Amino acid sequence: MKRFFLPLQLSLVSLCGAKAPNIVLILSDDQSYTDYGFMGHPHIETPHLDKLASESALFRRGYVPTALCRPSLATLVTGLYSHQNKITGNNPANTPENSAHAKRTGKDPKELIISNIDKHGCLPHWLGKKGYVSHQSGKWWEGPYQRGGFTEGMTRGYPNPGGRHGDDGLKIGRQGMEPVFDFIDRSVKREKPFFVWYAPFLPHTPHNPPERLHKKYLAKGVQNRVAQYYAMCEWFDETCGALMNHIDQAGIAEDTLVVYVTDNGWIQTEQGGYGPRSKRSPYEGGTRNPIMFRWKGTIPPSDRPELCSSIDFAPTVLAAAGAKGPHDFPGLNLLPHLKSGKKIKRDTLFGESFAHDVADVENPQASLLYRWVIKGHDKLLLTYDGAPGKMKYPPQGGEPQLFDLKKDPTEKTNLAPKNPKRVKELSALLDEWYVPEQRTMGKVSPVTTGPKAGNNSKKAQKRTEAPANKQSANPAESKQRPNFLLLYADDQRDHTLGCAGHPIVKTPHIDRLANQGVRFENAFVSTSTCWVGRSSLLTSTYERKHLYRVTPGPLNPALCESSYFAVLKTAGYRTGHLGKEHVSIAGESAGLMWDVRQRIGRKPFFKKQPDGSMRHETQILGDWAIDFLNDQPEGQPFCLQVSFNATHAEDGDKRPGIGHYPWPKVTDGMYEGQRMPLPPLNDPSIYEAQPDFLKKSINRQRYFWRWDTAEKYQTNMRAYFRMISGIDHVVGRLVKQLEEQGLADNTVILYTADNGYYLGDRGFAGKWTHYEESLRVPLVVYDPRLPKAKQGRVLSEMTLNSDVGSTLIDLAGLPVPEAHTGRSFASLMQGDETSGWRKDFLCEFLAVPGTIPRWEGVRGEGMTYARYFVNGPEKPPYEFLFDLKNDPKQLTNLARKKSDDPLLQRMRNRCDELVAETGPAMQEVGETR
Ligand SMILES: [Ca+2]
Ligand SMILES: [Ca+2]
């Protein structure tokens, strides 16, 4: 190439250092171009990247050609645009097209996407031909590292479980740098040129930075979620500092070309998640990022005013290595300009955006949403009608957008209507790049936000079924992976099961699961409220972490992404949720979590059937679950959750019995004539001893709805127990169904509830408090694979609702996401070493304003501590302390006896500690919505 004509002095330098340089790629994940010290951010500190910038040829106007993780990474290693390498999105969508490809080829659409790198080749392969060794760490989507031509690496990759985007590779940075350092040291010793792919899962979610960094940004007055993200940026910077330091200490700085790129932008919102004009969008917040090249002694440091694209990475690196790819690259070899400092004449960059999920793995245009061109400072953005799939921020309008990036870097003013000529000129450039023949410009396709819910017909379920998944089974892999059936009751305390020793209530099917499985006699929810119990179950986190309804918006999308549903679905499970949700889930999150989703509420419990008959929703859920199982493709594991509205009262109907606690027909007549024993803490003095704010709380108001007269109590109790037995009946039906389908031997069944429940105890009804009646829930786990000797045990370790999801993931053989505050109790079930299990947990109540004051506390093995912020978070709280060993009924409040008791002080401190580990202090928790 003629471009290699170099000034004499610099050519001599490269001749003297004749050997090929090492290449180190640092790839940030989900970080905006503004979010660095050297880019002028007012808060974020990145001293190590600032230093790298000062030693590099720095392009502040760098871009990626597409702003989503996987396709962006694929452009780097193939050197091709997404429409060329066909890796346009993160996942295959569940479409008839992909299903047809799967059928035709006998391959999973996931595999079909990966196979593109076999066709187009991959940078590590090409470097390997020149004697390079290479190491992959961090994010990597294209199967095991070997498939990309790396000689070493961390990612096991698809089709291994959890192999979607990096698995073990994602530990790099977050859990140290050893694998990379070790590789560098060995390569130096062997005198081999090397290539390092350092693509840590940073600052990407989960945003769980070290506490010292989080506190640092909180202290700067930054809002909590934003502070978490800023802290992640600095954490990432620290790992880059360690890497650069290692290179410099090894004495190879002059033999090593370091390239810095971000895969896509990220604009952190205060609710958690990213803003509309960042990740995935074609706007500056998505596509722009600083690009740096450092090669001491060869590339003079400078602040380069030109445009640069990550599409230039492959040809530039290949030139440095003296290697070649199998085809011409659309990017530019920048090396001559980097070395000489000469101006890069190119003033035009191109980019494109596709839907997150690939609508047709053989046809990139099927998912095309935008193309853009930047010439100088003019940017034209064109919109196309590709299939948007599950889009968080779908394209709007569709008209051409023209921006002057110099005057208007945040793209506020669309100049297109006033400048038709410029639009035409720039459109012509886009069409010189390539012409999307199958798409219409200026139009948008309607968005499908993932499976629609609320329709209880079987037809609706069929429509939401994932056809492509039918082929996605990997029999060898799924054999060891158990199915999960999670049965979730509403408003049920731990003691109301036959297996828990209740003298009246009949639950033979659940009892059988307990007798052949394990029952946890100390199972708790950390917050006793319907929607919080559910959001903690779904995200495997404390309320203080997910902050659902305390921060605006739907359930934290990042935590949805690390939910058991999303993790299992990603790993190839068919996932379904049937019944009560009571948590708002964003369409995009729902798409990641569920293949099948069908909601049903109470009000009323009985639903009219097509034949005119009335059916109780407990039984309808049984029907739906059986439908789900009947549709289960052979060889694919499933995770199905059935969330009953029973045994929640019909609050709007106060008629005792069938009005307030409507039971299904199948339990008609049960408990008739049986005398219901009175609640154990029925003595009026127990109620009288409560502080005023509890005496007047919703717990007391609802007492008068159901328990206050002997007759009401008797009638309602019988009805309530019929509801429980109604659930038990469905459990029996489902166990039978699993047996008939031959799934019983490999299906783990869990039974639990969203919160505890007062049945008149202490003169209360409902839940919401720190007392045991509120916090305790049933937890029965039946694992058919458990050896006989381990069956039928009652375990006393304290488990939490947030443990359930972590356990399912663990039982599936997948790593439990770091974002979980819950822990897997699988080892307890198996009877393994249990030392080191939790001795206490954070219990709290942030929601439902106006019912009772917010509170937080610690439930330890022998003590319960709680503090109620009766007069707001700034005022001294009202405290409770109970010695559970000597006072299991929690009748003597030790906190009222001696306010400076050392034990009380210890519990206060422990509470502070648990809060600090988990989320904001009570003073910083926002208003509940
Ligand atoms: Ca990314
Ligand atoms: Ca509930």
Image (spheres, rainbow, N blue to C red):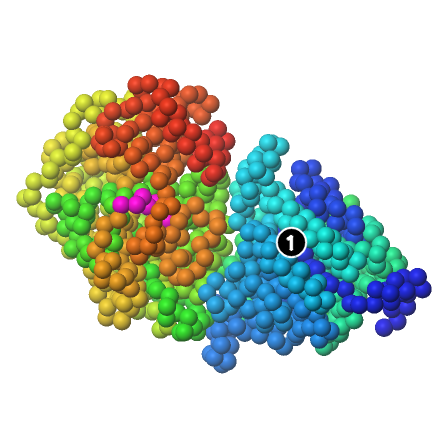
Circle 1 crowding by C-alpha within 10 Å: few under 14, some 14–19, many from 20? many
Residue at the image point whose x is 16% and y is 46% from the top: 501
* Residue type at numbered disc 1: Ser
Residue at the image point whose x is 14% and y is 50% from the top: 506
Write down the region rendered in magenta.
796-803
Which residue reaches farthest front?
189
Q: Nearer the viewer, residue 333 or 445?
A: 333
- Residue 801 colored magenta? yes
When asked about the image quadrant of residue 642, the answer is: bottom left
Residue at the image point whose x is 28% and y is 24% from the top: 893
Q: Nearer the viewer, residue 41 or 860?
A: 860
With 499 as the anchor, is 540 left or right in this view?
Answer: right
Residue 540 coordinates in the image, percent (x, y): 41, 48
Residue 446 coordinates in the image, percent (x, y): 53, 60
* Figure quadrant of the N terminus: bottom right
* Figure quadrant of the C terminus: top left
